Image (tube, rainbow, N blue to C red):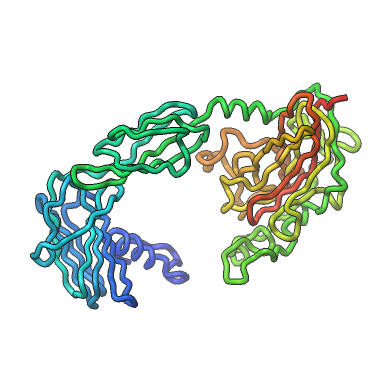
Amino acid sequence: MPGGFSQIGAGTDFSDCHNMFARTVVEGLFGFDPDYPNGIVRMRPAFPSSWPNASIRTPDYTFNYRREGDVENYHLTLARKAAVDFRLPVRAQKVRRVALNGQEVPWEVEAGFGCAWVQLHVPVSSAVELAIETVGRLAPGAPVMMEAQVGDEVLLRAPRGRIIRWRDFQDTFEDAQVEGSTIRGRLARKPGYHLVLAEVKVGELPQQQLFKLHVTDPEGEARRAAKTPRQAPKEASWECLDLRSQSNGDVRTIFKQQYLSPRPKTCSVRLGVDGYSAWTFPYWGDAPPPIDLSNLLNLALEPGRIMTPQNVPFARFADDKNVAFTSLWDNWPRFVTVPVNRAAEEVWLLVCGSTFPMQLRIPNAEVRFRYADGQVEKLELVPPLNFWSLGSWGGLDYSYATDAFCLPKEPPPSVQLGNNCRAMVLSWKLRPGVKLEDLTLETLSQEVVIGLMGVSLANPAR
């Protein structure tokens, strides 16, 4: 295989190796993008700036690139005539001239990432020679990386050029202004990774300058950690709520359903109708794992209750209906509400269900805590940060040996209720002295089923 791209079986099943070569080398590196039904070929090469020359020959075209001093030469030959749109990277302060087949021609310029794009249209032809003569050759531009905390005043300095305009797609700043080559502003309370884009003028040519910010919120993280303790106080008094009127399913049958709606009425690689299988699983023998509740006897604290490793008791659930499921599938309601009508120090939740790799790092569900005075607090369930599926997926489960880069520092508090039946043990510190009217679990993401198996109040008001 040209270029050394190969994958066992890929050429037989999907021709993956051919597509990989075409996309990465022919179209990506050399920029060949034919649209013959519309009579045009687009050329957008992306050679590393350090390359003095490059060439490729295929049945459809031949393309040669050569740099000589301040002149970059391109020679294109097409097996089939077509008009050609060129977009060529220029890393310089000025373009002195652009020559097409030896004759100087007009051109346009557009800001690119770390370069300027010189653009021109060539009428129908089978062979084209282009030469771009530049002044003040530059190294390719690179993103500016920065770490800061919410509320900090920061300076984002473009390494070269003057900022013409800029865009803050994610409202990273509360307020900011441009001063020459610098953006000065105060960071909003939005921790996470953010991108700011600026167009700069370098010499006579425009470029796009990326600023990549990692905004942290140590104080906010400390508050959230205090709001969601991992361990309950050992001497707490408890009230374990009875969820029998809310329970609507048996957790052991979560993958024995037919999840048919809503589902596109077309060919799709969406999650299988069993709520577990990717499209390849039936052919590879990856069936949904059997689920049982065999560990409940080991967790029993006293008649009618179970005790989790976090020192939290929950009411013993019924054998047939042991979970209040929610989902965007029509099999289950989108949300379930549990009346509380009590003040307490903390509320603890036993949450169990399934998620899917395509739903990671976004809120799969949320728990809303509604107080008697109307105020609502929210706890988002975001895998893999504080919610894990009840069992392995495709025979594999999270492992800190291999997955630590994407996992929280510690796994979320959980309890093993039986084989392939893990439940999250989540907590929320309540507002002191204010009655909690009710709590609502609502699913937000497609392809997941999440349910409540227990709700307990720590030190409820007497």
Residue 45 locus on image (x, y percent): 26, 59
Nearer to the camera, 408 or 359:
359
Tell me: residue 304, above or below residue 269: above
Tell me: residue 38, above or below residue 74: below
Tell me: residue 39, above or below residue 247: below
Residue 209 locus on image (x, y percent): 32, 42
Q: Quadrant of residue 288?
A: bottom right
Q: Residue furthest right?
A: 303
Q: Quadrant of residue 58?
A: bottom left
Could you tell me if residue 280 is visible in this image? no
Residue 124 locus on image (x, y percent): 21, 75
Write the residue at 19% across / 74% down: 125
Question: Image quadrant for the C terminus?
Answer: top right
Tell me: residue 392, above or below residue 77: above
Write the residue at 26% across / 74% down: 60
Question: Image quadrant for the N terminus?
Answer: bottom left
Write the residue at 86% across / 36% down: 305
Instruction: Classify residue 269 as left or right of residue 370.
Output: left
Q: Residue furthest top?
A: 235
Residue 73 locus on image (x, y percent): 14, 59
Nearer to the camera, 134 or 241:
134
Could you tell me if residue 243 is visible in this image? yes
Write the residue at 84% across / 51% down: 321
Count numbered badges in the picture. 0
Nearer to the camera, 323 or 124:
124
Instruction: Classify residue 331 as left or right of residue 42.
Output: right
